[in-house]
Image (spheres, grey):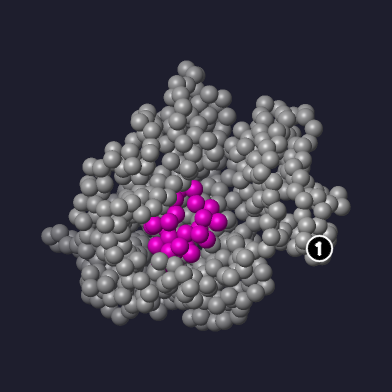
Amino acid sequence: MRSTHRRRATATGALIAAAAMLSVGVQAGSASARPDDSATTTALKAQAVRNPGALPATLSPSQRAELIRQATATTAATAKELGLSAQEKLVVHDVSKDQDGTTHTRYERTFDGLPVLGGDLMVDTAAGKTKGVLKANSAALKGISTAAPANAPAAAEGLAVKAAKAAGSKADKADSARKVIWMVKGAPTLAYETVVGGLQDDGTPNQLHVITDARTGAKLHQWQGIETGVGNTHYSGQVTLGTSQSGSNYTLTDAARGGHKTYNLNHGSSGTGSLFTQTNDTWGDGTNSNAATAGADAAYGAGETWDFYKNVFGRSGIRGDGVGAYSRVHYGNAYVNAFWDDSCFCMTYGDGSGNNDPLTSLDVAGHEMTHGVTAATAGLNYADESGGLNEATSDIMGTSVEFYANNASDPGDYLIGEKININGDGTPLRYMDKPSKDGGSADSWYSGVGNLDVHYSSGPANHWFYLASEGSGAKVINGVSYDSPTSDGLPVTGIGRDKAQLIWYKALTTKFNSSTDYAGARAGTIAAATELYGASSAEVTNITNAWAAINVGARAGDPGGKVFESTASVAIPDYPGAAVTDPVTVSGITGNAPSALKVGVKITHTYIGDLQIDLVAPNGTSFRLQNSSSDSTANLNKTYTVNASSVAANGVWKLKVQDKARQDVGTITDFKLSF
């Protein structure tokens, strides 16, 4: 029962790649650089929103730094206004601003000096007054002892090293460990965060974070910190690159875009290798045999991504601070992946199978750098549903970068990694119109989607973006045929990609937090669209319908039927205790139950993997909602979807729960059926 459940990024699931192109020192055609500030204003005005004040304001690095300074100077006053305890302190993580002056300040928290993981919150202010507060977890931080058993650090390290070895790491000790308060899920708990390095079994650097209960030693959570992620290029043709000259030499250093540098690892797997340097300003020849070709692709992808965020959203660099990341190409030998590492603020590209297909394609570059944007803003935890949304954000923005670049050699599409031949047969890595075509991704949300690898649980959000942008049904875009289905069989009308990407970006930067799940993403995007276009706008209606089309919420104007709920507290005895039931009486429903009956379940429990959960219909038919497993997460709050169309709706329905392993007890606190 207590076995470690291993879930990590696979080689094919982690990357979005781009190949190298030739760079010259002059602008040419649609691939030319666009660093002009005036383009930002033009692009934002072109969004044709009802409320331009809700658009993101363009902040220079110095303006952003001043906002951060002001927020930092008033953290004590803000904590007092929010009613935080005396043991809590706020630390400014990021500040963004809308054109109407509304400021969004993101904070991390500490408790008695310990970092609080999952305690992040955002405060919206306007005209000096607080408009709203968004917390990743609303639980109170009170009455928590920060004393831990003497053997807790060693026990935590041993468990973390074991988990890392299961992922291929040969490390025999942790890189770092710290005592923290863990509240990503459930009540605040004193814990240890242990990080183990080394390499994963596919050659990707390992940065496994393992959270263990400081008192019991039980594993609470784990996630992977590595987010897998004139130039004559391999994929984009001849393009303009930002380079620098020093004496008689040129380097792949883009001074106009935060000093972004491109390095050649020459098949190494650590450090930065050597900065691409040569005596002329033409980089690569379009072939893989020329090392600078991949360098040109990576530099071009970085430049287009910088320009996209700056000119479309007014964002100056990945963190908004005007500082460029750096790129490393030719990582490892025949390494079939690309990844973003926030600790070095860099992206890294392998050369693909047989070193024949570098992962340096344009959409991969945009994908990987967007992981940095997500880390700097919402900080979506890289596991469970939030991890899927993290990956989807990178797919959404990587796709948007590809359309933005408008490069004839790599026209925009809703295919991920279509240039890098990751499967060896010319097929893409992922499909946004119907994600399941890749063989692993989910088309629509269901209660267990967060248990998938994050690159597959991203499927519903990718599907939402396609439907919101283009709508359902068959169509051809830039020569690519799509035929996007909906989970409810009803059509969706698209609002256009420009509007959909703006809504997602505004939600990411002002509505999402570290623990946002699919329901939260729906609420956040609807709120963002409402601010931009108005509550009764076609944009709000259509994105709401796009969510319903992937089984997240109801269609616009649909009240969602009737809800029957029990809020009685039902104690769950420890194993080998008998199963307990919580009844709900359904009445007034004509005919049978629906094929998509929603079953909401809330249970407080210290180890939800112990629980076997069933829904029992009035006629005795049983529907299994959850088998017991090795999931060590505390507390359950899920909505399951059940095809109950074979049984009559009216009568007494029961939630049946049985503990299947020793040591833990809990309580059913809420059970509801939504017809």
Q: Is residue 249 visible?
A: yes
Dot 1: what SS? loop
Q: Position of residue 550 (x, y in %)?
A: 61, 65
The quadrant where residue 245 appears: bottom left
664 horizontally vs 353: left or right:
right
- Taking the view exactly as shown, the residue that stands out farthest to the top is 150
The residue type indicated by label 1 comes to: Asn
Give the residue drawn at x 51%, y 55%: 520
Q: Position of residue 126 (x, y in %)?
A: 30, 57
Residue annotated with mark 1 = 592
Q: Is residue 513 magenta?
A: yes
Q: Is residue 45 above or below residue 178?
A: below
Decide which of 425, 636 is in the foreground and name it. 636
Q: Position of residue 596 (x, y in %)?
A: 71, 61
Q: Is residue 289 visible?
A: no
Give the residue drawn at x 46%, y 27%: 143
The quadrant where residue 229 appears: bottom left
The quadrant where residue 7 appears: top right
Decide which of 218, 554 is in the foreground and name it. 554
452 horizontally vs 348: left or right:
right
Give the residue drawn at x 37%, y 42%: 82
Q: Is residue 482 above or below residue 585?
A: below
Q: Residues within 10 Å of mark 1 (few under 14, many from 20)?
A: few
Give the residue drawn at x 26%, y 64%: 58
Which corner quadrant holds the C terminus?
bottom right
Q: Is residue 222 magenta?
A: no
Q: Which residues are magenta?
A: 502-529
Q: Is residue 48 above or below residue 151?
A: below
- Taking the view exactly as shown, the residue that stands out farthest to the right is 619
Which corner quadrant holds the N terminus?
top right
Q: Position of residue 285 (x, y in %)?
A: 34, 70
